[in-house]
Amino acid sequence: MVHRALRLAAPAVVALLAVTTACTGTTVQGRPGASGLRDPFFPKAGNGGYDVRHYGLDLTYEPDTGRLSGTAVLTATATQGLSSFNLDLDGLDVQGVTVQGAGARFNRTGHELTIRPAGELEKGEEFRAEVRYAGRPRTVEDGDGSEEGWIRTDDGAVGVGEPVGSMAWFPGNHHPSDKATYDITLRVPQGYEAVSNGELRSRADDGQGRTVFAWHAAEPMASYLATAAIGRYKISTTRSPGGVPVLNAVVPEEAAGSAPALERLPEVVDWGSRLFGPYPFASAGAIVERSGTLGYALETQTRPVYSGAPEVELVVHETAHQWFGDSVSPASWKDMWLNEGFATYAEWLWSEQHGGVRAQERFEAFLDGDTDVDPSALEDWAAFPPAVPPGPARISDAPVYYRGAMVLHRIRQEAGDEAFFDLVRGWAAERRHGNATTADFTAYAEERTGQDLDEVWDVWLYGQDRPKAPRR
């Protein structure tokens, strides 16, 4: 509190502060953390000044009312002196915040939750922030019209987050560049299943009519890949021939239709391990919702979410993302082709190696618009270069997927199969559980293959004109 009679000119205030710090032997270092990471497409996503190492989420959900209540505990390291820092949280009511066990002041502006600790955090200090919150989570609409965030279903809900929807159900540093480990506890009425990422550590009756599911994701994960799925699923478990545990959760209506593809998931996991390097996580699996729930599939880490019974090719695509997108995550949302180009090309490779259309035939089909070979060939795959999407509403458009895959095929054409597959395995190993930019990949590709790939980058990756068939 400043007494009204104390009115000092600005220079006098500075002098007073200088005297105070000189007398106490302390210096004022803390400053607010940035309220956004200036992502090219989502500049307010994420926050600066700290790095989250672990999320502990304890969530209670009531399917009948749609109410979610939770406690989020973030363990983080300050990367600068902090007088305040921000978390991303869209909607929901914050009931209280502590930092290092002491009550902290907070306020909300849009999706920014600004927290002011009782004492400043020093650079390099590990701190623990706890946020208690509740409400009915929002569904977020993307620029392309798709929905994400917290999606209510006929008998439960599913949380999906690409690109920024996870902030609808838990507070965090919601940008793919800040990856962390997770423990997610879900408390739901008895008779419901609750599925998340990683491994199920325990399942118990709380004595109050709820079942408590504790999930642990030991490997770093971008927040958009976190999921919480609640419903009356049929649960099945198995292992891949190589020993990777597989857990699937399928709504009963989709069980029969999903069986042919999900029965091959263990085979797909081991196929990817041979082609791309060791599977990067402790478990695999799938969550299958009713058809039309989302309108898309999403590569949520270890346990992709499908909207309706998937085909084998879609399972291949989302499983390939476990290497490319989940383990090796984009440094910014402008780098989405590194996710989707690789996952799409994995579909081409699966087909090629399982008696179907060869990757070269698909490549030519897109150039020629031949839908007999690939029905997607008529999509506007050349509308823009995959490394330069025109805006956030276009990061899931055809060029990011198909022209992205064609970039990889052009590298294969230039380098040959041996060098190309060595590149793919090396890239997944080099950036395992990390992040990468397009520039990181292009530099690595030239170094690993020993090839000058300027033509591939200039024409196929960055070129504005529609590429033509390369001269052989």
Image (cartoon, rainbow, N blue to C red):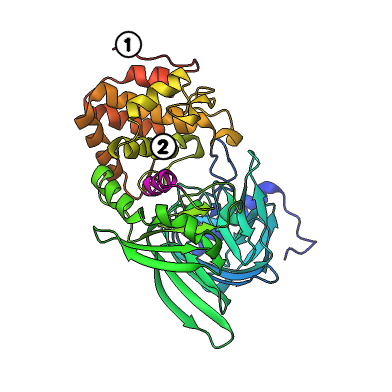
Q: Secondary structure at mark 2?
A: helix
Q: Which tag, 2 or 1, sits closer to the chain's start? A: 2
- From where the camera sits, is residue 211 visible? yes
Q: Is residue 316 above or below residue 465?
A: below
Q: Nearer the viewer, residue 33 or 113?
A: 113
The residue beneath circle 2 is: 344
Task: Please name the amino acid that badge 2 sits on.
Answer: Thr
Residue 445 is situated, as x and y percent measured from the top left of the image, at 29, 30
Most prominent secondary structure in the magenta stretch? Answer: helix
**Which residue occupies 55% across, 39% down?**
38
Identify the image quadrant of the N terminus. bottom right
| Label 2: how many Cα within 10 Å (few below 14, some 14–19, many 20+) | many
- Disc 2 from disc 1: Cα separation: 24 Å
Residue 62 is situated, as x and y percent measured from the top left of the image, at 64, 73
Q: Nearer the viewer, residue 470 or 459?
A: 470
Residue 227 is situated, as x and y percent measured from the top left of the image, at 51, 59
Using the image, tell me which numbered label, if any, was put on residue 158. none
Q: Secondary structure at mark 1?
A: loop
- From where the camera sits, is residue 128 visible? no
- Residue range in magenta is 311-322
Identify the image quadrant of the C terminus. top left
Snapshot quadrant of residue 421? top left
Using the image, tell me which numbered label, if any, was put on residue 471. 1
Instruction: Residue at the far left: name it.
Output: 418
| Relative to 317, 40 lies left or right | right
**Which residue occupies 45% across, 68% down?**
235
